[in-house]
Image (cartoon, grey):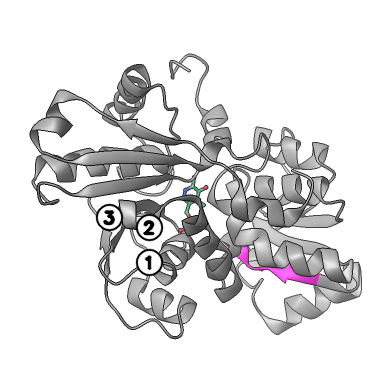
Amino acid sequence: MTQLADIKKINVDINKIENEFIAEKKISLSVLRLDKIHPEISGNKFFKLYYFLEQAITEQKKIITFGGAYSNHLAATAGACKEFGLNCIGIVRGEEPKNISHTLLFCKKQGMHLEFISREKYNRKDGEDFKIELTDKFGDHILIPEGGYSIKGAEGAALISNLYQSTDFDYICCAAGTATTLSGLIKSSTPSQKIIGFNALKDLANFEARIQFLLSSHVDKNYSLINDFHFGGYAKKTSELISFINKFYEAFAIPTDFVYTAKMMYGVFELIKRNYFPAGSKIICIHTGGLQGNLSLPAGTLNF
Ligand SMILES: *Cc1c(COP(=O)(O)O)cnc(C)c1O
């Protein structure tokens, strides 16, 4: 990638998932491989960052954003800032441990400056006082909310729809954390399409209010949030989920991550089993990347 705008027209693989069960249900199932767009900046995060990066490049400003020790968002921001020659600061939740996570090590390697703050202070990060403190300490900057949760983030996520032919699909599935990516997909959808979010959190607070905030103008309700496949909550896992990841990779050679994309794919198969999708449905699942998160699993857990 040489220019930021290249991401709008990048060629991304769409893999067809075929087996007897899916054929019997008369479903067409595909996966958009956003995990493959860039070695360091995988998945939906790049798109959510798009308009922030554009502004930072134009105005030559540094970026400040937030996340926890395993945050895909921090990793993607660090990778993107390196790629486009921007300075960036990551505000990390919790005191600095002796051994920092593989995610934070990666961020440092990309040149991100890490600033650890207490959880108590982190909870106040959206307040005016904290924002003033950031400006005093780091000067003029562009602030990106945690996880890219913002109208701008949703507008960036809407660019994902450039990468597939809209008329080819009736259902668009994606994993949901802050619901920003889901909102972008809703924004760019046609009225006859249905967008299905698979909640990766146990309690995604006020989902409808989030969608309203992120999509100030969208009125059609062509979306649903499925809450049945979080496997105990954010970043929780069971042996069944791990076994699914390995079987899915064995069958289709697509790696998934245990926090988001595996839960979505598991959920999609379950819904197909439950005849949620009418025969003849054409489904595209957005592989939102996040594979770096699997590095927190013990070695040998996964077969890829
Ligand atoms: C962050 C993330 C999501 C969730 O995206 P939201 O826009 O916050 O809903 C989904 N999948 C992966 C792999 C992610 O890293």
Residue corresponding to mark 2: 166
The residue pinned by badge 3 equals: 171
Mark 2: amino acid: Ser
Q: Is residue 10 magenta?
A: no
**First in residue order: circle 1 vs circle 3:** 3
Q: Please name the residue that numbered disc 1 is placed on.
A: 189
Q: Which of the image's four quarters has the N terminus?
A: top right
Residue stretch in magenta: 142-146
Q: CA distance from mark 1 to mark 2?
A: 8 Å
Is residue 46 something that shows in the picture? no
Q: Which mark is residue 170?
A: none
Mark 2 vs mark 3, CA separation in Å: 10 Å
Q: Which amino acid lies under the numbered mark 3 shown in the image of this protein?
A: Tyr
Residue 76 in the image: above or below residue 53: above
Other-residue count near label 2 (Cα within 10 Å), few / some / many at <14 / 14–19 / ≥20: some
Q: Is mark 2 within 8 Å of ligand 1?
A: no
